[in-house]
Amino acid sequence: MSGASAQAPRRWRPAPRIANPWLRRGLWVLAVAYVAFAVADMEFDVERFISGIPRGVDMVASMFPPDFSRWRLLVDGLVESLQMAFFATGIGLVLSVPVAVAAATNVAPRWLYALARVYIGLSRTFPEVLIAIFFVKAFGFGAFAGVLTLVVASTGFIGKLLAEEIEAIDPGQVEAMRATGAGPAHVLLFGVAPQVLPRFVGLMIYRLDINLRESTILGIVGAGGIGAVLYNSFARYEYDFSMAILLAIIAVVLVAEWFSGYTRARIT
Amino acid sequence: MTGAAASAPGSRPWQRYTRGQRLARFAAWLAAVAVLVWSAGTLDIHWPFVLDAPRQAGDLLGRMLPPEWPFFAQVIGPMVETINIATLGTLLGAALSVPVALMAAQNTTLNAATLWAARVVVVASRSVNELVWALLFGVVFGPGAMAGMVAVGVSSVGFVSKLVAEGIEEVDGGQVEAIAATGASRGQVLIYAVLPQVLPTIIGVLTFRWDINIRQSSIIGLVGAGGIGITLNNEMNSFAWANVTVILIAIFAVVMASEWVSAQLRRRVT
Amino acid sequence: MLTIDKLTKTYADGHQALRDCSFTVPGAQVVAVIGPSGAGKSTLIRCINRLVAPTRGHVHLGDTDLTAAGTAGLRDVRRRIGMIFQEFNLIERLTVMENVLAGRLATVSFLQAFLRRFPAGDIDRAFELLGRVGLDGYENSRADALSGGQRQRVGIARALMQEPELLLVDEPTSSLDPKVARSIMGLICELAGERRIPALINIHDVGLALGFAQRVIGLNGGRVVFDGAPEAVDEAVLTRIYGADEWRDAFRQEGGEDMLAAGGAAS
Ligand SMILES: Nc1ncnc2c1ncn2[C@@H]1O[C@H](COP(=O)(O)OP(=O)(O)OP(=O)(O)O)[C@@H](O)[C@H]1O
Ligand SMILES: [Mg+2]
């Protein structure tokens, strides 16, 4: 046996993630101070909250039973949302191919690459709703602005992921194509496309899922779909109608999620 | 739709699909095209508006540029509030997700009822957009950052719980069993055997969600729930487009920075 | 003393994994449980500490009826039984020390476990055990940075940390190379001997079983078909346990023929 039992008890503490004690404590103090500041900055109004509780209860109570009597309005809005999502996904998909090619370091020239990356950065950074506001300003209210928004967001999204896929392709196959004397178009078609196609279909389904969700909300800023109906029902305190719309949206999202999962499982 | 892989030259020969499979693939393609045409045909496009759009857009751009830089001073406050909403909302969402994730995982849930209750919560949280949650909580808390924070928290619950529950379901049962065999209580098994295994997932999901929440917090102000969105709305309503540009630049910078920070954090957990 | 009385397990799918198993382990004794794959060896061990709920029968450890223990009682029962696994089942992302201290979880509160605040006495004993299994200086290594043999040593230390009255060991060496396997078997038997506690060891390697155990129990189809000294294990017995011929192949692979010829003299 070792002689450890004869010595004073040995100490052990779990090793901290950050070894330097001062840095560790400093970070803790900073974190706590920040949260304290952020909470204080919320300007939480207790009185407003207390008076808000009955309002909230009233709202929830008036949501039930959901009112489906104006189902025509609901269905029209929902169909428009679906159409926006489908159409934008289709167009977005087609347009994302040139974007992706332009944004792949291994195939695009420098200047084009830079341009494509700026476009992708902008379209991915700004939330869809924000982009929609500007399209509504430029094209007026309606589904067209919504479709454009979703197209821009989709091309940025698919374009980025697809570009990464293109950058990761096996250079051997591209070399082989070049060696046969094929031009750039041929290289893309025969050397690159086959390697990225499965992923492409997966991305399309994924993005369709996102576009369906977004299309139900863009109406809030006037870009078409069920969102406008929903927003109006809120503004008019018709919460039972709001609830009906929300339930319909949830149903659509669930179906979309199921479809997306089902198709993606079949592809891979 | 899956036919794409087969028809591409140079890929594996498509003889490996039976005639029936090829037909199914063709039918899927056809259906996709039909849906596309149907969607396009019924889109109500106002051609005068569209034709006028380039002029409108050019006009707008002219008003937006150059940015009104001095306005930046008035952007900082709301921008900080936006970040606070996102961060506190993520923390709130994390706290609310603890019970939901545990109940939504097959191997830690109590019974069939808790499993389904958790799944309903996840679906509701995920399918209802942040803006809608912000509208709902605006009724309770009044317009402002508080409603925004709660909306961000509630809408994070579904995302976080779903992914963490999936992580819990993938936990190595042997490690859990070993801890249970020492005589540990149920709670101890959770923190000693399950938590260490899902911790990387939790941190990854939370930082990712925080990144998403920064983006979302910048728009919930459009429905009055605090943050930079309120400033944006005000400036647009008063047609101060050069100020709007400054706001957009600020949002862009913060979102980019948050993406970088969250990627750094994720890289550090192993 | 461990008493197993007519233990029977029928899984939910109707499969009878154990049929009326009975035997007694008096005092300190290393018992090797051998049998073909699917014989019910793991089921037997798991029914004892109730990781698997037995269908019928009783298990007594000393005076305690393990099969009758309620939720709180079960925790105490499990605390009194150390278990060692084939796949080690360490918490991979925790340190060696945290893994060893897991053996004390039944004696600390939820909060203590969360903050890893174990009593100083426990930490002292954990250091001592780490030294005993040959892992001095490894306390702050992460478990997933260790070799297979080292991991099993941590597993052994964790089980002994419980101050168990019984060791349940499920194929401790199947994931290890033969040389390490011998040293791990030796370590388990030695430590059980030092602490004068019985050990029930499931093992595929008949050579190792005969070499280290003081008693051999043969299972086949969920029944005890042999129970006796290693010296009594001959071809006829092995045929009874494993079925005709099959055991020869398995046995030859393990290089155990010499062991059998020597009549299990190593013990
Ligand atoms: N959870 C379970 N559900 C249904 N049947 C099970 C379950 N666990 C084990 N079995 C079955 O019970 C029988 C005994 O299994 P057990 O794991 O005890 O065998 P074993 O002797 O340990 O085998 P091995 O040497 O392969 O580890 C096997 O036929 C097995 O298929
Ligand atoms: Mg087994």
Image (cartoon, rainbow, N blue to C red):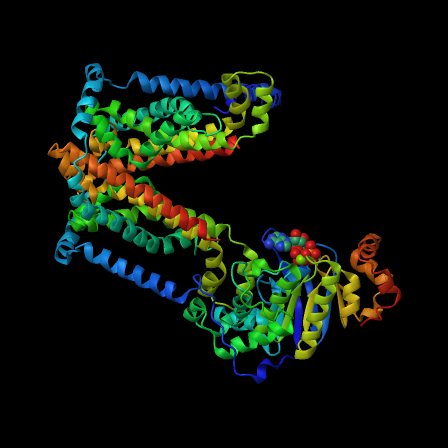
**Residue at image coords 40%, 51%:** B265
Residue B25: where, in percent of width, then height? 51, 21
**Residue at image coords 80%, 63%:** C207
Would residue A185 be found to the left or right of residue A74 on screen? right
Is A76 rendered above or below residue B235? above
Q: Quadrant of residue A246?
A: top left
Q: Quadrant of residue A48?
A: bottom left
Observer able to see residue C47: yes
Residue sitting nearer the eye, B111 or B2 = B2
Is B165 rendered above or below residue C169? above
Observer able to see residue B226: no
Image region (quadrant) for ligand 2? bottom right
Would residue C203 be found to the left or right of residue B182 on screen? right
Residue B170: where, in percent of width, then height? 51, 50
Residue sitting nearer the eye, A204 or A96 = A96
**Residue at image coords 64%, 63%:** C150
Is A1 rendered above or below residue B92? below
Residue sitting nearer the eye, B76 or C206 = B76
Q: Which residue, as the protein is rendered here, is positioned at the far left?
A: B238
